[in-house]
Image (cartoon, rainbow, N blue to C red):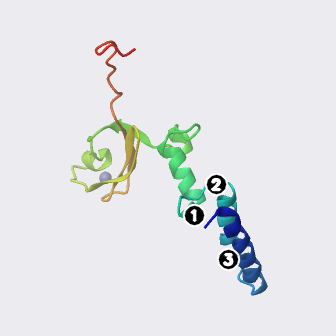
Amino acid sequence: MQREPLLHLVTRLGHAFTARGMGAHARMLRVYFLALRHGLADSRNAVRVSLTEEAVLEWLRTLRVPPFDAAEEGGYRVQPRGEGCGTCAARGETPTVITDAVFPGGARMRCRSCASVWLEEDAPAQKHEGRHGVP
Ligand SMILES: [Zn+2]
């Protein structure tokens, strides 16, 4: 369906939700309406978003966006790839470590044994300047 007719139908559904006191549905539909109107839906007019304040803060820490790049602000420590859980290693324990999230340039790791969380960054990409004549 084209966007304009769909927006019209979404508005009518919103009125129906509101008339029946279905506030939560109406609020969700309002977010959908805004995303649709601003061209943020995919090719099937779908909008899939599930974000929380907690998730936003987690991503700020994960991508080390200031001030969340500092431990004082709850930032995660950064360690080399594959080093494992330092907390468990210090206790002489063998932890179970999982990859919590991956992002371009690194990963957020989580220890299932002691609940520690840290970041592992990929080594900086080697530059091949001039090898193939590419500047
Ligand atoms: Zn651990």
Instruction: Choose the circle earlier in sequence order: 2 or 1.
Output: 2
The residue located at (40%, 14%) in the rendering is 135
Q: Quick check: marks 3 and 1 in contact, CB under 8 Å?
A: no
Asked which quadrant contains residue 45, the reply is: bottom right
Q: Which residue is at a point 56% across and 43% down the rendered structure image?
A: 73
Task: Select label 2 or label 3 by which is in front.
Answer: 2
Of the pair 40 and 102, the residue shown nearer to us: 40
Q: Residue at x 29, y 38 (%)?
A: 81
Label 2 CB sits under 8 Å from any ligand 1 atom: no
Mark 1 lies on residue: 45
Mark 3 close to ligand 1, CB under 8 Å: no
Q: For mark 3, give the secondary structure.
A: helix
Residue 35's disc is none
Instruction: State the residue at coordinates (70%, 74%).
Output: 9
Mark 3, Cα crowd under 10 Å, few <14 / some 14-19 / many 20+, is few
Q: CA distance from mark 2 to mark 1?
A: 9 Å
Give the amino acid at mark 2: Gly
Closer to us: 110 or 107: 107
- Alpha carbon of mark 2 to alpha carbon of mark 3: how far? 23 Å
Residue to which mark 3 is pinned: 24
Q: Secondary structure beneath disc 1? A: loop
In space, the residues marked 3 and 1 are separated at their CA atoms by 21 Å
Q: Residue furthest bottom?
A: 20
| Quadrant of residue 34 within the rendered picture | bottom right
Q: Amino acid at mark 3?
A: Ala
Q: Nearer the viewer, mark 3 or mark 1?
A: 1
Q: Which residue is mark 2?
A: 39
Q: Quadrant of residue 133?
A: top left
Pick whichever, 55 or 125, lies toward us.
Answer: 125
Picture coordinates of residue 107, whole percent (x, y) = 37, 45
**114 left or right, relative to 32:** left
Q: Amino acid at mark 1?
A: Asn
